Amino acid sequence: MSYKTPLGQVRGLGSAKGGTRHWWTQRLTAVALVPLMVWFVVSILMMMGADRVVIVGWLDNPLVAGLMLVLILATFHHAQLGLQVVIEDYVHSDIWKIGLIVFVKFAALLLGGIAVISVLKLAFGS
Amino acid sequence: MLSIFHRITGVALAVGTVLLVWWLVAAASSAAYFAYVQGFMGSWMGIILLIGWAFSLYYHLCNGLRHLFWNAGIGLELGPARRSGILVFHAAVGLTALSVAIAFAG
């Protein structure tokens, strides 16, 4: 049993019953993505047009593979949260809204999963 | 100013993750398939997509920093907000141009 007042129970959760978690996670992943993306883009620019051997050697380094995994997780989590907000703001039919949000979440999971497996495969050498 | 641009570039980046995943899958597959994907990235279509992706990334990243500063209560006044908006746009164009120069030089 909660001794909170009705106002206290409601405050901080809002209509979606999720409180500030969505907003906060979006900022958290954004902050993580700033250095990660700078690192990724600089790395990619330095390997422009390189052979597969170079990329494989790059991802063979545990530090690189680890950073790539965090980058993938943060990217797809951030993308999925952001797209959800965009859909919620512009799509007003409930069916389409829910359908699109589910599609975006599944697509993020699938693409993120494939990316993670690819990096792991290269990280464990094959 | 241009706040809708943050969303447009965000959506573009989300779509662009397909390129990133394709590239990773190719690297994890075979030398032949990786060469095929590299070939596509080097084609006119690929170059246009990559430049669009780079500009979207730089804009979204710089403007995202601007949003984070706003969240901290910094630069919310009309004057600084307008100036930082212009700065972000110039930074995105400059960084894209720099990246293209590095990509073609290397």
Image (cartoon, rainbow, N blue to C red):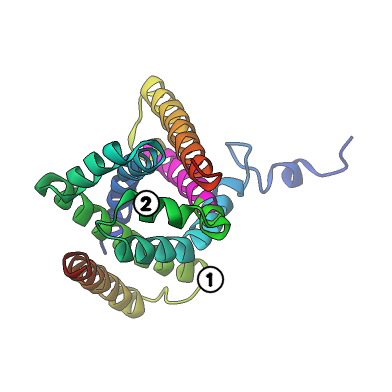
Residue A126 point in image, percent of width and height: 48, 40
Does A79 lie within the magenta span? Answer: yes
Q: Residue A53, which numbered label?
A: 2
Name the foreground residue: B105 vs A28: B105
Q: Chain of mark 2?
A: A
Name the foreground residue: A101 vs A73: A73
Name the foreground residue: A99 vs B42: B42
Secondary structure category for the residue under label 1: loop
Q: Amino acid at mark 2?
A: Val
Query: Which residue is found at the position 16% from the left and 65% from the top?
Result: B104
Q: Chain of mark 1?
A: B
Residue B106 point in image, percent of width and height: 21, 68
Over which residues does the magenta segment extend?
Answer: A69-87
Q: Amino acid at mark 1?
A: Ala
Query: Which residue is found at the position 29% from the left and 78% from the top?
Result: B83
Does B30 lie within the magenta span? Answer: no
Quarter holding the N terminus of chain A is top right
Q: Quadrant of residue A43?
A: bottom left
Query: Which residue is found at the position 69% from the left and 42% from the top?
Result: A10
Q: Is residue B91 left or right of residue B66?
A: left
Vertical relation: A33 (above or below) B83:
above
Residue A34 point in image, percent of width and height: 45, 64
Secondary structure category for the residue under label 2: helix
Q: Is residue A17 left or right of residue A97?
A: right
Name the foreground residue: A66 vs A59: A59
Is the same chain shared between marks 1 and 2?
A: no
- From where the camera sits, is residue B67 visible? no
Q: CA distance from mark 1 to mark 2?
A: 44 Å
Q: Main secondary structure of the magenta part?
A: helix
Which residue, given by chain and number where applicable, does mark 1 sit on?
Answer: B72
